[in-house]
Amino acid sequence: MPTAAVMPAPRAPLELREFPEPELTDGAALLETMFSEVCGTDVHLWHGRLSGVPYPIIPGHVSVGRITRMCGEIVDVEGEAFREGDIVAFMDVHGSCGHCYYCTVAKATTRCPERRVYGITFSADEGLLGGWATHIWLKPGTRLLRLPEGLDPAVYIGGGCGLNTAFHAVERADIAMGDTVAVQGAGPVGLSCVAFARLRGAGSVICLGAPAERLAIADEMGADATIDISKRDESARRREILGLTHGRGADVVIEATGHPGAVAEAMRFARDQGRVVVCGQYTDAGSIEINPHLDINRKHLDLRGCWGSDFSHFHRSILMLGRHHRDFAWHRLAERQYPLSQAQRALEDVEALRVPKAVICPPRG
Amino acid sequence: MPTAAVMPAPRAPLELREFPEPELTDGAALLETMFSEVCGTDVHLWHGRLSGVPYPIIPGHVSVGRITRMCGEIVDVEGEAFREGDIVAFMDVHGSCGHCYYCTVAKATTRCPERRVYGITFSADEGLLGGWATHIWLKPGTRLLRLPEGLDPAVYIGGGCGLNTAFHAVERADIAMGDTVAVQGAGPVGLSCVAFARLRGAGSVICLGAPAERLAIADEMGADATIDISKRDESARRREILGLTHGRGADVVIEATGHPGAVAEAMRFARDQGRVVVCGQYTDAGSIEINPHLDINRKHLDLRGCWGSDFSHFHRSILMLGRHHRDFAWHRLAERQYPLSQAQRALEDVEALRVPKAVICPPRG
Amino acid sequence: MPTAAVMPAPRAPLELREFPEPELTDGAALLETMFSEVCGTDVHLWHGRLSGVPYPIIPGHVSVGRITRMCGEIVDVEGEAFREGDIVAFMDVHGSCGHCYYCTVAKATTRCPERRVYGITFSADEGLLGGWATHIWLKPGTRLLRLPEGLDPAVYIGGGCGLNTAFHAVERADIAMGDTVAVQGAGPVGLSCVAFARLRGAGSVICLGAPAERLAIADEMGADATIDISKRDESARRREILGLTHGRGADVVIEATGHPGAVAEAMRFARDQGRVVVCGQYTDAGSIEINPHLDINRKHLDLRGCWGSDFSHFHRSILMLGRHHRDFAWHRLAERQYPLSQAQRALEDVEALRVPKAVICPPRG
Amino acid sequence: MPTAAVMPAPRAPLELREFPEPELTDGAALLETMFSEVCGTDVHLWHGRLSGVPYPIIPGHVSVGRITRMCGEIVDVEGEAFREGDIVAFMDVHGSCGHCYYCTVAKATTRCPERRVYGITFSADEGLLGGWATHIWLKPGTRLLRLPEGLDPAVYIGGGCGLNTAFHAVERADIAMGDTVAVQGAGPVGLSCVAFARLRGAGSVICLGAPAERLAIADEMGADATIDISKRDESARRREILGLTHGRGADVVIEATGHPGAVAEAMRFARDQGRVVVCGQYTDAGSIEINPHLDINRKHLDLRGCWGSDFSHFHRSILMLGRHHRDFAWHRLAERQYPLSQAQRALEDVEALRVPKAVICPPRG
């Protein structure tokens, strides 16, 4: 019988529960989970930092698995039908309505109020709608992608949800070829930002983060320089960036930290008429002080928030991963695998920053 | 003999001084001043709020006048030669180098470190390089424009420096046809933003400002709604904007106030995935608190600083003024004219907000 | 009983036929037609110039009417429910899939292969899916818009399908404020392009077309200059445009003619580094000769095809019409109304260019 | 005494001539030529295909050399002074005026009528203003760049003028990460386009050209697939591209061939709503036939001409070359070096397509 690790409430210990197999309606499928990721968002969920979460939930928003059952025909974006046995990833965002002002007029689908997210805004009471489980119920309309040939599912889960977010952030950063890009953060999102900035044509990528082991991964993700924030205070960091950029500051700064203060720093790391993309402030961790004259107006700065991702980011980021995974260290982001029964430990290891992310690897049926 | 109103130092009373006529080298000209504006920037100069100002100065960065002498040929952007007697305006920014990183690689000429500004960063010791004077020395390379046929110089000076700034801000706002645009500020820049937002295709323009007389001008500049900030606190203002925008917030907010707090408000007035342009923070008037999660990241906000202007803004804004001045109330912005000898009073009337801007109108030779 | 004018096949005379009232499933509605337009596309349909048309059809892709019945709740883009009696227009394009490569990755929804169009690619065998009828069956998912307050349905139908197309073309033209825009064509699309170019901030709009009566309407739609192509050959037209643009050519040219040769002309009317938008080549009317060196490469030209429209164009163009219909002559585009029984005559009057467009005005039930 | 290979007139044999050393005015320098390239443009010059060329000329628009003398201080874009002995490249375009409509309002500096080009539009009667010479006279205002550390001048000249053109074309192509890019042409420009498309984040790059040896270099420049146009006719080529792109066509096509017919092909190789950049039509080689309905309008195509380059392209392309020259085969483009005395043979070898480009390597003084 399908089994899942359920988070009953914030701070409550995870519990293994059995679920009935879902009845599949037309367009639905059942996935046998190969890997599901444990990332910082799951820690936020456990800390109760996200609003509107319908506990109890089955966490795990990004996963990869094998189709074991389907109802009716499901086709991919090219119109090719999926078959049982196919190894697929799926887009965690489900159900953007396609009708509201945000979907149609503003073309801002990541702000559609109808969208729901596997592993986050579906309740366990609704069924197997999270990845920390032996099986995942893919509702009709879920967007699936076959992994590209030659891409190991274990490497894919190394990228995981950070792929989409980082891809979107780098897209929004409008990097020009030759630009110097500073990435704040050496977690899964920041590290993928480093790689995508390189793939996008940055002339040079600087990664700011800690600890040293993560910065070592940043090197393997293509960073030209790293700055250990545990050893440099803000003014030393800024000096270092100015030193690497003819005294001007970075052309582009991408914030991927979760720390509000990083946003103010980003504005000071960027050169005049530079761009700052903020993608790391997923929860409300407090306010910051900025100076509108110095930090925005006189700098002629572009500051861009970046929320969520859409299918194009999912599709394109996996395509790029399939093309370039051998040149970057995505496999390093998810080196430690945990059986479903140890989901609690996986969560705690991520919480304690012992690993960039953890991977739940349920026993095969 | 040419006479100018000189600001000897911050807070020091203006003095009338006589100047020798400048020797004109090739490409230079002498302008007989018809009108020169007194705007908020001049108040900042008098308060000593701008750094790097080489007092004593002759204020007056935007002016209009008649060419009385020229040395060699000076051509306009179309290659047509100017003649003595032509009525012209000129670009206050002078001497962007065309060689530095900002001019050539970043294409961010408003951040060129070589640029100087008539009436602001030229010293009176260098000569007649400001508009509060009977004559203005136009150095070689100064960019002149003939006023369009039918455009009264008194109407042009109503737009004055606000034209360029507002044009640039509206350009940078990337308004889509039909967008709701909120303009914060009912001073010369804000009022020109209202008009340009309308001319750009806004579906609706809301002007926030005070006092009532300025909002009455906003109506004549094309505002669909006005909000008197002296009668509504921030939360009432926000409610009103939400009420005008289906509860979403404005598609675009343009800040043109000079008050730091307006920038934080702007971020809350904008809808998700909206745009905020900040052009009013010309001096450092302090810091503000923002919440990166709520105000930037989750909103997927675009926040854009807007510094200075270039010749394209000058050229295009005057072209639009020439085309549309009958439909908008630019003449209302500069209704009160002062002889050169009353420059001090003009400055104090602007300081006290008794007029949106004042106009210096030297005696004709 | 609902009655419609059916086009049985290309060149076959229209026939009035009775239809059973459609059974409404959830989300469907029945509209009592007030006005339906007859435009050049209908002439193309009658000439058999469009491929994939499932004759017999009920023509009439853009219409306005009153909701007489509904099944379930239908909400507008703001989430507000429609009621019986509401006067609405609806988007002619129906059923973009939201799942294919074009809808999701390329974000090119007007190229979605699943989209169908009322009055064009629905067969009369499927029911009342065209506007030349007393009633129109609105299938679930059809996008409806209430007419803005104060907008007469007869004025709306003057804009009709040309609104969306022209709005899209002008959006794609990236007009900068102050640009000179040349619009080729004085039919319904061209005339709406003139108005939208003005509303978008063009400094000057030149309309090229014929005959004189249409150019008179162009004047009322905001053209600054018109060029009668029946009296000027291509080289005289080009000379005239150069004469209006300091010898450079127009900043933007929008082709809305249907004549292939106009595209080559457009490339020669545009200035170096200008933009040409092609929206008038709706059917294959033959080939043209261009010189890639002179017309594209050396000119550094931007040439942009523009196909179809999406809901944002529909929504925003009606919003702008509601806001500005008093300042432009949209009502002049559809001055002649025909009862349903005279649909054939309406079609022939449009074919013979006796009217810019005709309006079918079925008898009220 | 400085010596140069002079092209006296079209089709006339090159002649070695001696020149006096130029008198250097402030800001001028004398360069001892290390390498100067011979490319397709030089063949056009020899064939008399370019208009406005002031024969006799010293060809050689892109070169690299050592500063032997300077007058006054010359600084780079970072403000750092050059010194005698520095190895530099220089921008072939000289003297964009900075004042005309194209330079200031249109921001289309590559269309400035004042610009002149070393080796093309300077006459030998004006002095040593071309690269096929022992020395080159760098006039004041010439934009110099130091070669990045570790970049062999012989590798730089492999990129040569193709670097700027290709960089500009790829910039203008707006490649999205993951796009399939088809590059037409395997000459120096096409091959650099392949590399820059890869560096820009293309998901896959297809190079069409001939002969086989050039396509082998295309492989080393990062092509994922090559199509030998000497073995496939247009319809076979199109089939192959459709086969590589799920039947849709390439997201982006970059034309870099010089053959007019390639432009029509490009429009058919591109997918709906794709982009075509035309940079290879440097001379007028005749007209082509296109179908505006099929090739532009219904496709919703973007077609972009690309003329010349500016300093940002020069700066950024050399920066990228310095960063990535080890991963791409730029050195392969200029394998054959010729002493100045064999310039005629070099020219003929390029004309006969025996080499992608040739390199003139004057004897060291």
Image: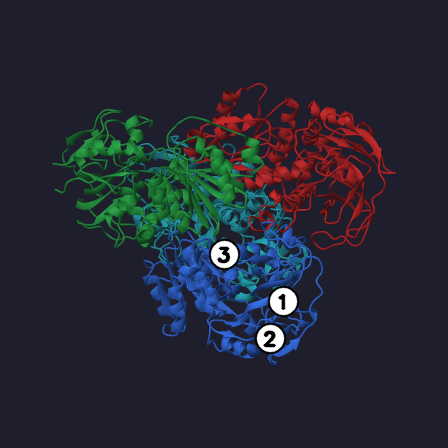
Chain colours: A blue, B cyan, C red, D green
The mark that comes first in sequence, 1 or 3, is: 1
Q: Is residue A30 left or right of residue B362?
A: right
Q: Chain of mark 3?
A: A
Q: Which mark is residue D294?
A: none
Q: Nearest to the eye among marks 3 and 2: give it.
A: 3
Residue B319: give x, y in percent of width and height. 50, 37
What amino acid is at disc 3?
Glu
Q: Chain of mark 2?
A: A
Q: Is residue A304 left or right of residue C57?
A: left
Q: Which mark is residue A136?
A: 1
Q: Disc 3 marks which residue? A: A149
Kindly indicate the quadrant of the structure image that contains residue B270.
bottom right
What amino acid is at disc 1?
Ile
Q: Are marks 3 and 2 on the same chain?
A: yes
Q: Which part of the image, by quadrant, shows the C terminus of chain D?
A: top left
- Above or below — where is A295 with respect to C354? below
Packing grade of label 2 (10 A; few <14, some 14-19, many >=20) is: some
Q: Chain of mark 1?
A: A
Q: Is residue D333 visible?
A: yes
- Above or below — where is D148 with respect to C49? below
Work out how far the residue at label 1 is from the one at label 3, CA to CA, in angstroms.
Answer: 23 Å
Q: Is residue A126 left or right of residue B262?
A: right
Residue B105: give x, y in percent of width and height. 36, 49
Q: Which mark is residue A48?
A: 2
Q: Nearer the viewer, residue B238 or B211?
A: B238
- Above or below — where is C361 with respect to A158? above
Packing grade of label 3 (10 A; few <14, some 14-19, many >=20) is: few
What amino acid is at disc 2?
Gly
Q: Nearer the viewer, residue B25 or D78?
A: D78
